Image (cartoon, helix red, strand yellow):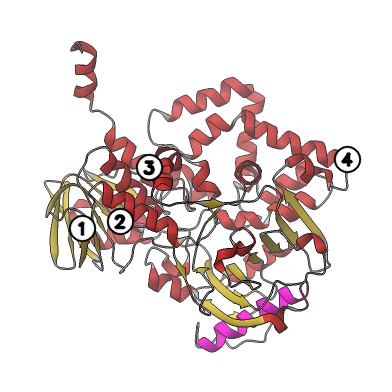
Amino acid sequence: MSDTGISSDTVDAIVVGSGVNGLVAAAELARAGWSVALVERNDRLGGFIATEERTLPGYGHDTYSSWHPLFVAGPAYAELGGELHRHGLEYRNTEGWAIASVADDGRVACAHRDPELTAAEFAHDADRGAYLAALQRFLDNAGPIGGLLGSELHSPGVLRHLGQLIRGNGRAGTEQWLRDLASSGRAWTRRHFEGTEVDQLWAPWLLHAGLSPDHASGGLMVPVLAATLHGFGLPVVAGGAGAFVAAFEALLAEHGVAVHTGAPVAQILTEDGRAVGVVAAGRTIRARRAVLASVSPSALYGDLLPAADVPSAVREQAGAHRPGRAAMMLHVALSAPLTWTDDRLTDVPLIHLSDGAAGTAIACAEAEAGLLPRNPTVVVGRQYLLDPTRVPAGAASLWIQLQEVPYAPVGDAAGELDTSGGWTEELAKGYAARVLDRIARHAPDLHTKVLATDVVTPADLEAHNPNAEHGDPYGGAAELDQNFWWRPLPSAGSHRTSVAGLWHIGAATHPGAGLGGASGHLAAQALLQPTGLARLLRTVVPK
């Protein structure tokens, strides 16, 4: 067990897991004067945040996550950003064309940081006004909607956000928001737009929220995603995402957090129905005030807690918790930047290969049926355009994310690859070749510039982070019955669990996956709120 900070077997709070939510929770509690222990099973902090030379020396690849619009837009950054920047965090961003989607027939849709310039590219005049109106409608309601998406839903405070939404929109307007919540992304774009540009641009982005184009709540998420990109761009960490973790490590050290790496937690200790500590790598660490667990529901309620402390309904629902589609990563070292068939793509940092809801929905359906999609939606990231230090001078790299793959493939929709052995090295290479061939349709010189590739399979994701059950990095399916009020479980939808002093955070909990750190922030801030007695004393005792 590797320890840093103040080493003690008894602290105020223990945080289990060091993904973004664990880092945020530990930092916020420690800044408020709590003694904190952060316990991580791996040998390094960060969860799915890392930068490594996975292909060739001099090429820094963000192994997993990379883009930080949710973090810079969220409350955790508002709370911690100043100190993180003081400890070396720097962002690189674009003020120009940020994203694009490219269809097989060559159609390209692009989005600029400026929504007016984005809408100006639409073929239909009516769509230009409709797009800007949809963004403005969200911005006019960003306070209450953001409050609902980023607050503890099972608390009286949520009524304030609902009240603001109703007062600001009236009955008809509020019903429209509910209709959007019940709508899929495909239905929402069909309802509001004549042309294909909005669908082509934003339907693939639903994958980043753990959805497909035909899942309910996509109608709410499309304008949320669009407004976030226009407002905050695509920030990446200078020097690679690993520098984000390094800034947190320095912040935690400054505030005396005891960091234990290489220390998998085997058990959460309870006494009289209250969480009082953990057993990690054979060592007992006790908590005076709280244990915060950034783990999957099945791990928390099926493995870590004594069975007697878990209500039967919660145990049954945790056993039935559904993972979402699996994902995989492909990293490519290039000798030089690619030449695209459409010049508009030359300087766009993030490109989706998709025609919108049509092709992306088919790929999702194939993956959910256990098949390797014949035409996967391909996310092509080029962080080096924003941060040239990631590659040697004159070179380039690709960060490729695939969010429609089966964890245990039973076949290949194209009938070309042998899946009988699961995610073997041969299958991983074969599927990677399919993905590169799809990119090469739009960048014909790709194959001549590839120097090395590295593949991270769904099995690799789960091995690195057990929270990614079945290779799903989003903490479980985000369909409506397992999201929002019901996330992670219908009987356990709050970060405060039924075990006193135990809090559940992480991607499996509301508001879900992404690099926002919201669940860690919510739990930490709830713990830091004065008790009822303290609030009463403040009102009756003169200062």
Q: Secondary structure at mark 1?
A: helix
Q: For the residues marked 1 and 2, what is the alpha-carbon distance in whole angstroms?
A: 8 Å
Does residue 140 appear in the picture of this structure? yes
Q: For the residues marked 3 and 1, what is the alpha-carbon distance in whole angstroms?
A: 28 Å
Which mark is drawn over residue 521?
Answer: 3
Which mark is drawn over residue 315?
Answer: 2
In the figure, residue 294 lies in which quadrant?
Answer: bottom left
Q: Position of residue 336 (x, y in %)?
A: 68, 75
Residue at the image point whose x is 83% and y is 66% from the top: 106
Q: Earlier in the sequence, mark 2 or mark 4?
A: 4
Q: Earlier in the sequence, mark 4 or mark 3?
A: 4
Q: Secondary structure at mark 3?
A: helix
Does residue 313 appear in the picture of this structure? no
Q: Which residue is mark 4?
A: 125
Q: Secondary structure at mark 4?
A: helix
- Extreme-front residue of the structure: 393
Q: Position of residue 539 (x, y in %)?
A: 24, 13
